[in-house]
Structure formats: structure tokens, C-alpha cells
Image (cartoon, grey):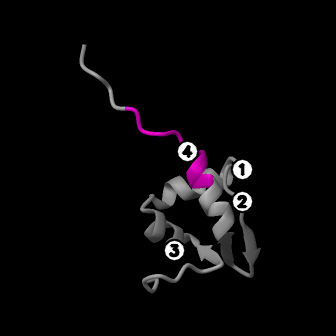
């Protein structure tokens, strides 16, 4: 678990899931279709904090449906 107030420079996939409250499959789908960039270090996949934040900002805003 991440310490309060500490944001790592790079995230592992489980850290992205925990920090941004998204599913593992959502992260892997974003990696697969190129919306989220990452590097491989051995067997580990690392995503920079900047790339993760940019990806989150690129997601569509929630727009509630208004009953007619």
C-alpha cells in the first residue's frame, strides 16, 4: 500500500489499480490500445506518474442522464 502523501515516480499495475481505483482489465486495455504508455523492467510493467495522470485526464467526464 502507498504511504499517505507519497506518490511514486513510477507505478506498477497493482499500484495504478489501487491509486486510481480502476480495474486491472481497464489498465491493461489502455496499455493494449496505446492510451497509456509504459516501460518494461524485467518482468515488471511500470507506468510513469505523468503518463498515469495524463491518461486519467483523457478519460471522458461523467454526464448523468436526465430523465425526460
Which tag, 3 or 4, sits closer to the chain's start?
3
Q: Nearer the viewer, residue 53 or 21?
A: 53
Q: Position of residue 46 (x, y in %)?
A: 67, 73
Q: Is residue 57 magenta?
A: yes
Mark 1 secondary-structure assignment:
loop
Mark sitting on residue 59: 4
Kindly check if marks 3 and 4 are in contact, taking CB atoms under 8 A apart as contact: no
Mark sitting on residue 34: 1
Query: With 26 as the anchor, is 40 left or right in this view?
Result: right
Mark 4, residues whose alpha carbon is within 10 Å: few (<14), some, or many (≥20)?
Answer: few
Q: Is residue 19 magenta?
A: no
Query: With 38 as the anchor, is 6 left or right in this view?
Result: left
Which tag, 3 or 2, sits closer to the chain's start?
3
Q: Nearer the viewer, residue 52 or 34?
A: 52
Q: Nearer the viewer, residue 56 or 28?
A: 56
Q: CA distance from mark 3 to mark 2?
A: 15 Å
Mark sitting on residue 37: 2
> Which quarter of the rendering shows the N terminus?
bottom left
Kindly check if marks 1 and 2 are in contact, taking CB atoms under 8 A apart as contact: yes
Mark 4 secondary-structure assignment:
loop
Mark 3 secondary-structure assignment:
helix
Q: Mark 1 or mark 4: which is in front?
A: 4
Mark 3 lies on residue:
15
Q: Position of residue 24 (x, y in %)?
A: 49, 61
Mark 2 secondary-structure assignment:
loop
User: Which residues fall within the magenta stretch?
Assistant: 55-63
Q: In the displayed orientation, state which residue is furthest to the front.
A: 5
Q: Residue 54 appears in which quarter of the rendering?
A: bottom right
Amino acid at each position: 500500500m502507498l504511504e499517505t502523501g507519497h506518490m511514486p515516480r513510477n507505478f506498477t499495475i497493482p499500484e495504478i489499480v489501487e491509486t486510481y481505483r480502476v480495474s486491472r482489465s481497464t489498465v491493461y486495455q489502455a496499455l493494449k490500445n496505446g492510451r497509456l504508455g509504459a516501460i518494461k523492467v524485467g518482468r515488471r510493467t511500470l507506468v510513469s506518474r505523468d503518463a498515469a495522470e495524463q491518461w486519467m485526464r483523457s478519460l471522458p467526464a461523467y454526464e448523468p442522464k436526465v430523465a425526460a
